């Protein structure tokens, strides 16, 4: 196997009783969740990772010991928590009661549904396990979401590993992994300053792509006071204390805050994120967004007023032309005729307003005294 020679990872496989193994309370796949007990870990795995499907498979077809779990020396399973959860739920009635889980009904339980031991490969530390996990599992059948990848990569780099090495292990480009790491690190700085991702109004999982994409834009880096070169890691400490207010404001715009009844201004990342970046770079538009939290209204200030007038006028003209083309289908409804009458009045008023701004070339001579 390709992973057999991985440094820090035992080449041999050790049989271990499932009851002796421990769940990973700091699983990077579940990046934003803090667990207080193994029961909480199991409950989350059941809810989010199709453990029930695996339980049914083991009960009917038996345990297939096809790939070893990866564990640290203290028996904490770094890779294979879903499989461990299925085995423990099958074997432990007390655990099932604790998490409110009921085994699926089957006619005949397989004789190997309760294996005495499972294959485990021990790692000296998480770094050694990460090489295996990154290469074989992050992009595997149960793909990790961007937030889990970001946490995984950031923690790995924080241990002293090079971004390029991490990128190759994860199977992603250098730029992609660097974006994930930078997004994660800035998110952690925001958390340290009081921002709670669980308070976001955006849908789960937490869309870290909003943040890491924004951090690639020069205007956002200027807004946050980030001077780090583009191809280097942004650490949590990169955001200076005097820029914390801007960071928290950015997080609020990107993700919203339920506790403040303030939704995210990002409806869809494209085009809203690009609009937000341009608004932040424009003082008047940014002030409008702060005051009224309306991205569309703030965006209007990005266009000079005379250009906005021309745009609106041309849109109205096109609308009138389209209505005229469709007038053959008018059915005589009086209210529609009233709308047109009001439009006529509006057009006359608009014409008068526009004419009033035009200088009469003879006006200068109107009050001039006659020559004698």
Image: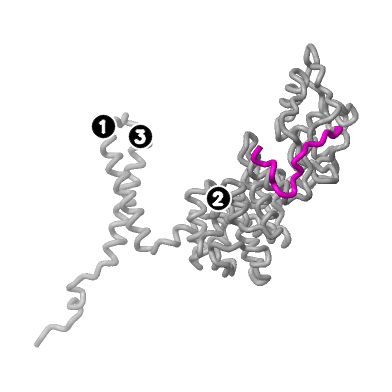
Which of the two labelled residues, at mark 1 and mark 3, occupies the earlier sequence position? 1
Residues drawn in magenta: 1-17
| Residue 281 left/right relative to 331 | right
Instruction: Say above or below: 209 vs 352.
Output: above
Residues at circles 3 and 2 in contact by the CB criterion of under 8 Å:
no
The x, y position of residue 371, in whole percent, is: 10, 85
| Residue 219 left/right relative to 134 | left
Residue at 29% in and 40% down? 322
Q: Which residue is mark 1?
A: 328
Where disc 1 sits, the SS reads: helix
Which of the two labelled residues, at mark 1 and mark 2, occupies the earlier sequence position? 2
C-alpha separation, residue under disc 1 versus residue under disc 2: 41 Å
Instruction: Say above or below: 110 vs 165.
Output: above
The x, y position of residue 245, in whole percent, is: 65, 66
Where disc 2 sits, the SS reads: loop
Q: Nearer the viewer, residue 171 or 40?
A: 171
Residue at 78% in and 11% down? 107
């Amino acid at each position: 196997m390709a992973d057999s020679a991985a440094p820090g990872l035992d080449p041999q496989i050790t049989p271990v009783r499932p009851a002796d193994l421990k769940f990973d309370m700091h699983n990077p796949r579940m990046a934003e969740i803090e667990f207080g007990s193994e029961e909480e870990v199991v409950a989350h795995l059941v809810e989010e990772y199709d453990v029930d499907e695996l339980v049914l498979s083991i009960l009917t077809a038996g345990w297939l010991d096809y790939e070893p779990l990866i564990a640290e020396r203290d028996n904490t399973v770094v890779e294979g928590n879903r499989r461990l959860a299925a085995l423990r739920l099958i074997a432990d009635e007390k655990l099932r009661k604790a998490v409110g889980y009921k085994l699926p009904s089957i006619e005949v339980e397989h004789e190997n549904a309760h294996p005495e031991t499972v294959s485990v490969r021990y790692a000296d530390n998480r770094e050694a396990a990460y090489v295996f996990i990154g290469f074989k599992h992050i992009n595997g059948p149960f793909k990790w979401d961007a937030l889990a990848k970001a946490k995984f990569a950031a923690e790995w780099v924080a241990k002293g590993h090079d971004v390029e090495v991490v990128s190759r292990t994860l199977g992603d480009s250098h730029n992609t992994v660097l974006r994930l790491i930078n997004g994660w690190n800035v998110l952690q700085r925001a958390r340290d300053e009081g921002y709670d991702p669980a308070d976001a109004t955006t849908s789960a999982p937490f869309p870290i792509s909003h943040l890491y994409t924004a951090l690639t834009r020069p205007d956002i880096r200027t807004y946050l006071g980030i001077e780090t070169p583009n191809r280097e890691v942004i650490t949590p400490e990169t955001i200076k204390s005097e820029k914390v207010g801007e960071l928290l404001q950015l997080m609020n715009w990107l993700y919203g805050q339920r506790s403040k009844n303030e939704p995210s201004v990002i409806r869809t990342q494209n085009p809203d994120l690009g609009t937000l970046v341009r608004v932040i770079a424009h003082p008047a538009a940014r002030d409008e967004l702060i005051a009224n939290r309306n991205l569309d209204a703030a965006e209007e200030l990005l266009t000079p007023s005379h250009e906005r007038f021309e745009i609106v006028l041309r849109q109205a003209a096109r609308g009138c032309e389209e209505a005229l083309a469709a007038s053959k289908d008018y059915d005589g409804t009086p209210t529609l005729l009233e709308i047109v009458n009001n439009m006529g009045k509006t057009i006359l008023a608009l014409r008068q307003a526009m004419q009033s701004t035009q200088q009469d070339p003879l006006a200068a001579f109107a009050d001039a005294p006659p020559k004698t």
